[in-house]
Amino acid sequence: MRVGYARAARLLDILEDKGIIGPGDGAKPREVYVSKPSEEVSPESVSLEATGVVADTIEAEKEEEI
């Protein structure tokens, strides 16, 4: 999967809004506020609806703005 600059920036904004990562500070790495889960979670068991991230496509992003 390829992620362009605009989508990557949007994903970082979403993660920051949800309190998962800290704010950007130039070239310094962002602080991560969420620790690793104690048990492994398979990708199949996690739905996009459960994550709250709905702007996974440009079309979804446009619908979110309406």
Image (cartoon, rainbow, N blue to C red):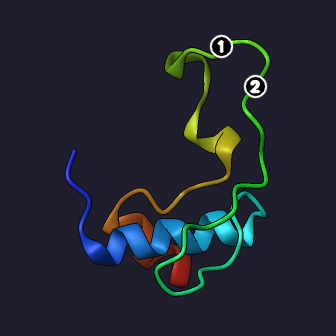
- The residue closer to the viewer here, 49 or 41, is 41
Q: What residue is at 63 percent from the left and 43 percent from the top? A: 49
Answer with left or right where residue 38 lies relative to residue 29.
right
Q: Amino acid at mark 1?
A: Glu
Where's residue 60, x and y in %?
Answer: 43, 65
Q: What residue is at 58 percent from the left and 75 percent from the top? A: 13
The residue positioned farthest toward the left in the image shown? 2
Where's residue 56, x and y in %?
Answer: 42, 56
CB-based contact (under 8 Å), mark 2 and mark 1: yes
Query: Looking at the rendered structure, which numbered label has been put on residue 28?
Result: none
Query: Image quadrant for the C terminus?
Result: bottom right
Q: CA distance from mark 2 to mark 1?
A: 7 Å
| Circle 1: element type | loop
Residue 24: quarter of image: bottom right
Residue that label 1 marks: 40
- The residue closer to the viewer here, 28 or 52, is 28
Disc 2 crowd rating (10 Å Cα; few below 14, some 14-19, many 20+) is few
Residue that label 2 marks: 37
Q: Amino acid at mark 2?
A: Pro
Q: Is residue 7 above or below residue 38?
A: below
